[in-house]
Image (spheres, helix red, strand yellow):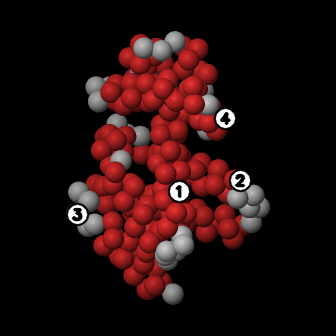
Amino acid sequence: MYQLKARKNKNNLFVRDCITQALFELLKKKGFEEITVTDIINKAGVSRMGFYRNFATKENVVEDYILDIFVETIEEIRAKRELDFSISRVMTTTLENFKKYADIIQLFLDKGMEFLLYDCYQKTYSILRESRKQKSSHIRDYSEQMFIGELFSLEMCWLKSGMKETPEELARIYRLIHLSRK
């Protein structure tokens, strides 16, 4: 599970960033499965203890990165909530943030990490539910899983097709699709 406590410790931010950037650099040359923790710490210039103080596994490095993207997106949505909390605005903000990180997400896809990415999306929404103190219900769970699947598929399709539409255009398309289902 994602280590929320380590994220909050400002002393760890530099080490975490070094580890994350080292993993990304290694991914440009090797497959994810080929990369070891030893490779990461050597590239990052940190100790093994420094790695394990911040992450349980190399998969957690990716999870942390994706969660940071989602946290940034949620903070932007909350900041804009006063102005416009429509599905189009929420989707536009989500897609704008996704676009900022498209290069690294494309690298993940190129390295066959699509399932790990999808798992990150699911974990993020699970953490969000827990943070809002929402109880699980079968309807909420099904609805959440549908949204996660839709968002993930929409973003991956957009990325794979060259991101020709703007975030606003794609949010409008998403809204039209949802309206046509009603």
Q: Earlier in the sequence, mark 1 or mark 2?
A: 1
Asked if disc 4 and disc 3 are in contact, CB closer than 8 Å, the reply is no
Q: Position of residue 36 (x, y in %)?
A: 45, 19
Relative horizontal placement of residue 125, taking residue 117 as reference (left or right): right
Q: Position of residue 113 (x, y in %)?
A: 41, 40
Q: Nearer the viewer, residue 64 or 58?
A: 64
- Kindly report which numbered mark, 4 or 3, lies closer to the viewer in this rendering: 4
Q: Which mark is residue 34?
A: none
Q: Nearer the viewer, residue 111 or 60?
A: 60
Q: Which residue is mark 2?
A: 130
Q: Position of residue 151 (x, y in %)?
A: 46, 62
| Spatial separation of the CA atoms under disc 3 and disc 1 | 26 Å
In the structure shown, which secondary structural element does the residue marked by tag 1 occupy? helix
Query: Which three-letter amino acid code belongs to the residue tagged 1?
Result: Glu
Q: Earlier in the sequence, mark 3 or mark 1?
A: 1
Q: Which residue is mark 3?
A: 164
In the structure shown, which secondary structural element does the residue marked by tag 2 occupy? helix
Query: Which three-letter amino acid code belongs to the residue tagged 4?
Result: Lys
Relative horizontal placement of residue 139, taking residue 159 as reference (left or right): right
- Kindly report which numbered mark, 1 or 2, lies closer to the viewer in this rendering: 1
In the structure shown, which secondary structural element does the residue marked by tag 3 occupy? loop
Q: Which residue is mark 4?
A: 5
- Kindly report which numbered mark, 4 or 2, lies closer to the viewer in this rendering: 4
Q: Which residue is mark 1?
A: 75
Q: Is residue 48 above or below residue 104?
A: above
In the structure shown, which secondary structural element does the residue marked by tag 4 occupy? helix
| Spatial separation of the CA atoms under disc 1 and disc 2 | 17 Å
Query: Which three-letter amino acid code belongs to the residue tagged 2?
Result: Glu
Residue drawn 31% across and 60% down? 158
Asked if disc 3 and disc 2 are in contact, CB closer than 8 Å, the reply is no
Instruction: Answer whether residue 65 is visible to the viewer in this image.
Output: yes
